[in-house]
Amino acid sequence: MSKSIKIAVVGSGYVGLVAAVCFAELGHQVICVDNDQRKVDALRGGDTLIHEEHLPELLARHGNKGVVFTTDLAEATAQAAAIFIAVGTPQSETGDADLSYVEAVASEIARHVDSYKVIVEKSTVPVYTNEWIRRVIERNGVSREMFDVVSNPEFLREGTAVEDFLHPDRIVVGADSERAAKVLGDIYSPLTEGTYYKTAEPIPGICTEDAPAPILFTSTKSAEIIKHASNAFLAVKISFINAVSNLCEAADANVEQVSRGIGLDSRIGPKFLRPGIGYGGSCFPKDVAAFRSVAEQMGVDFNLLTEVERINATQKKRFLAKVRSALWTLRGKRLAVLGLAFKGETDDIRESPAIDLCEMLLGEGCQLVAYDPAAIERAKLELPPSAQMQYADSVEGAAKDADALLVLTDWAEFKSIDLEMLQRTLRYPIVIDGRNMFDPKTMSEAGFTYLSVGRPVANPAREVVKA
Ligand code: UDX
């Protein structure tokens, strides 16, 4: 049986909350701290506040028992052996990560350190942040032997965050002291020794079998770079396949076949080679910009990342051009929009390319009727309802009398849309799919003019000018 460790997690956003309930699931005693009393009250009442699979079940299982919620950072610091900082690191105007929340939490923690503590960076931060946290804590009067700062980046994806936490590809611990590395090693031992997979009480839908998770111990600076480099590399992969998809469109080739063909090379791998309307979300855009900015500040040429960002932005413009190519003029056109979240199975709209495209289409004078299975309420804050921007509570409601249907988010439920219903409901059977959700042949046979990304246009009904 692994040791139960007292852990504080500061910040109950995506990363903090998932880490807190999952640490409780691993048998630790967790205090999750947030300075927003309303959030703390909601979490105590069992409301996760975010749409994330399996999180409600885990919160019901451990809430107010293995994981307690509080605004009291002093008490949490006093009790915990390890304090995970999981507060936001938003992008500042220069592209750098804004680390003021991290600094504020570090200096607050420092005021309450009364015994040896391991302070863990869980937020995505640029290299050297651990040094700054150390300095801030020392400046606040804590002597060096009373604490260590460790970097333990999180690689979870929204929508599969719980599964990713409990079945990680790897756990990275950047620690410059053996004492601190051991604390982190103990915290993760149920996963790295595989005992969790043998003893876990299953949560429906979560796999409880797996081989022990690999753990990699590095220097703190290497761990900080691993996090940024991982996200930046994935963004490179996406921009690369998006550029290839544009070439496929020009050459009348099929990017799906090309993607499969290159992905079968084990050195490349099949994942993250889906073309679309560009990456979004709370991580990739921010992390690519921050990594580029860190490199710049250190005098390192990383223009590759500038190009990755440029391709990502172009992808949205190309989609807009595709809509225009199918509809000729845009002013006054009524368009059904499927999907507002930055990707499927989440209600998150941060840096969502779907929202950007809606703004671009509204700017062209289109009238939009949007449906998303989970993100409508959040979207209304960005795109307030009006005569031009309307919301529907079903695919059918959005499609009614629309001049065309646009697919902007890869929600799994869109794959099983009733095509006959679409034919009946749309004014014209035109589908422009930014996520390659449908098979062009099926769409063609069903009588649609169907434009997707990097694949030949299925166009039985009308002539479409190429984008
Ligand atoms: C990402 C990383 O995957 C995760 O490891 C890190 O901790 C946080 O950032 P997330 O933002 O939840 O996770 O989403 P992810 O599934 O990685 O997708 C990011 C964006 O890339 C989405 O907009 C998605 O639609 C897009 N994407 C992804 C593609 O366009 N093509 C792909 O092949 C994969």
Image (cartoon, rainbow, N blue to C red):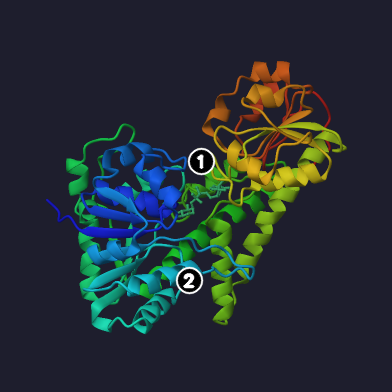
Q: Residue furthest left?
A: 1
- Looking at the picture, tell me which residue is in the foreground, 148 or 395: 148
- Report whether 350 appears left or right of 137: right
Rendered residue at 24%/52% (across/down): 191
The answer to whether 309 is drawn above or below residue 201 in the figure is below
Q: Position of residue 224 (x, y in %)?
A: 42, 69
The answer to whether 181 is drawn above or below residue 61 in the figure is below
Which structural element holds mark 1? loop
The residue pinned by badge 2 equals 126
- Report whether 295 appears left or right of 28: right
Gap between marks 1 and 2 measured at Cα: 26 Å
Rendered residue at 27%/54% (across/down): 30
Q: Earlier in the sequence, mark 1 or mark 2?
A: 2
Q: Position of residue 398 (x, y in %)?
A: 69, 27
Rendered residue at 26%/44% (across/down): 210
- Report whether 269 appears left or right of 383: left
Q: Which numbered circle lies on residue 346?
A: 1
Mark 1 close to ligand 1, CB under 8 Å: yes
User: What kind of residue is marked 2?
Assistant: Pro
